[in-house]
Image (cartoon, grey):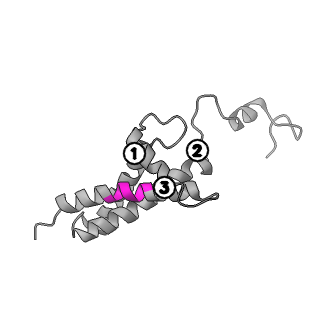
Amino acid sequence: MLGAAGAEGGSFAQEENLRWREGEAKMDMATILPWVILAVGGAVGGNVLGAVTRGGGGLAGRTIIGAIGGVAAGYAAGLGADAPGAVPAVHNLAGSWQSLIQGEYADDLGNLITGALGGGVLGLVGGLLIRSRG
């Protein structure tokens, strides 16, 4: 699409809108993918341990609880360079999973296992506390 300035470069307002403003969060695939992997791992871990305890509000409830637990575990592990929620013990445990394999998927495997553990903990607690009355 051509701006007011023609084919050469577009208008100043369009160029300003294309640039990321300083201090603004940038959400691209590289930024959001670790959090998605944590949520998927948490959903699986929450479903497994929630189903073992036969509680947790059904499949949808265990999935939501597990995904929240997985993301919370990643936050506690200090995912990202400037994460303010890093708990040293969780950070050390999560870092040990990344050494299981070598290569470009080591971080993803570490995030998946960390998410599964976090989701599993919340799935277990939710499975024990959320019960049907019948």
> In the picture, residue 103 is in which quadrant?
bottom right
Residue 37 visible in rendering: no
In percent of width and height, residue 51 lies at 27, 70
- Residue found at x 82% / y 43%: 2
Q: CA distance from mark 2 to mark 1?
A: 25 Å
Magenta part of the chain:
114-120
The residue to which callout 1 is attached is: 90
- The number of numbered discs placed on residues in the rendered structure image is 3
Q: Answer whether residue 59 is magenta in the image.
A: no
Q: Identify which amino acid the numbered label 1 is placed on.
A: Val
Sooner in the amino-acid sequence: mark 3 or mark 1? 1
The secondary element bearing badge 3 is classed as helix
Check if mark 2's residue and mark 1's residue have beta carbons within 8 Å.
no
- Mark 1 neighbour class, 10 Å CA radius: few under 14, some 14 to 19, many 20 or more: some
- Residue found at x 38% / y 42%: 89
- Residue found at x 61% / y 49%: 30
- Viewport quadrant of the C terminus: bottom left
Q: Answer whether residue 118 is magenta in the image.
A: yes
Comparing 58 with 125, the one in front is: 125
The residue to which callout 2 is attached is: 27
The residue to which callout 3 is attached is: 97
Q: Kindly report the secondary structure that dominates the magenta region of the rendered protein.
A: helix
- Residue found at x 79% / y 33%: 11
Q: Identify which amino acid the numbered label 3 is placed on.
A: Trp
In percent of width and height, residue 46 lies at 33, 62
Q: CA distance from mark 3 to mark 2?
A: 26 Å
